[in-house]
Amino acid sequence: MPSQTVGSIARIPVPSVDTSTPITTIASIMARQNIGAVIVTKDYEILGIVTESDIVDRVALGNVSDLVAQDVMVSPVITINYERTIQDALKIMKDNNIRRLVVVKDKYIFGLVTERRLLIANFVRQNKE
């Protein structure tokens, strides 16, 4: 059985915000869409990623009402081509100690994969063999 690609299991579309989006708005987007991250972009260029834990870390430090995406985003963002395999993605995550990868196709955002989504897909694939 051929290896499954990350593009075939990526979450599409990926919510994105610009650098000036308030953290409170980002948290609202995450809650409303039941997601754990948004991508920070400008003119289709990937600038950073904001995750739930980035927001929680800032909230723990105090007032976040004046913070915007640029203040809390992690950059640079590690990406993976949509044709790469689940195993490739898991290795990249392990090597970089991250839990999410932005999936790209022709330099544009294609989707997002999480460690959990990759592990479930890998488990299902192995049980079919």
Image: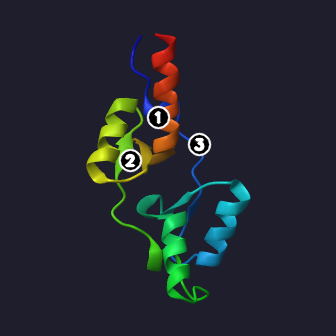
Residue at x-position 54% and y-position 58% = 37
Q: Is residue 18 above or below residue 16?
A: below
Mark 2 and mark 1: Cα distance apart in space: 25 Å
The mark lying in front, picked from 2 and 3, is 3
Task: Report if the CB atoms under discs 2 and 3 are less than 8 Å apart.
Answer: no
The mark lying in front, picked from 2 and 1, is 1
- The one of 111 and 56 positioned closer to us in this rendering: 56
Q: Secondary structure at mark 3?
A: loop
Q: Is residue 67 left or right of residue 93?
A: right
Few, some or many residues within 10 Å of mark 3 (<14, 14–19, 20+): some
Residue type, numbered disc 3:
Ile
Location of mark 2 (residue): 107
Residue type, numbered disc 2:
Lys
In the picture, the quarter occupied by the N terminus is: top left
Location of mark 1 (residue): 119
Few, some or many residues within 10 Å of mark 2 (<14, 14–19, 20+): few
The mark found on residue 66 in the picture is none
Pinpoint residue 13: horizontal percent, then vertical percent: 60, 46
Residue at x-position 49% and y-position 75% = 57
Q: Secondary structure at mark 1?
A: helix
Residue at x-position 44% and y-position 70% = 73
- The one of 124 and 89 positioned closer to us in this rendering: 124
User: Does residue 120 show up?
Assistant: yes
Displayed quadrant of residue 52 = bottom right
Task: Report if the CB atoms under discs 2 and 1 are less than 8 Å apart.
Answer: no
Mark 1 and mark 3: Cα distance apart in space: 18 Å
First in sequence: mark 2 or mark 3? 3
Q: Secondary structure at mark 2?
A: loop
Residue type, numbered disc 1:
Leu
The mark lying in front, picked from 1 and 3, is 1
The mark found on residue 12 in the picture is 3
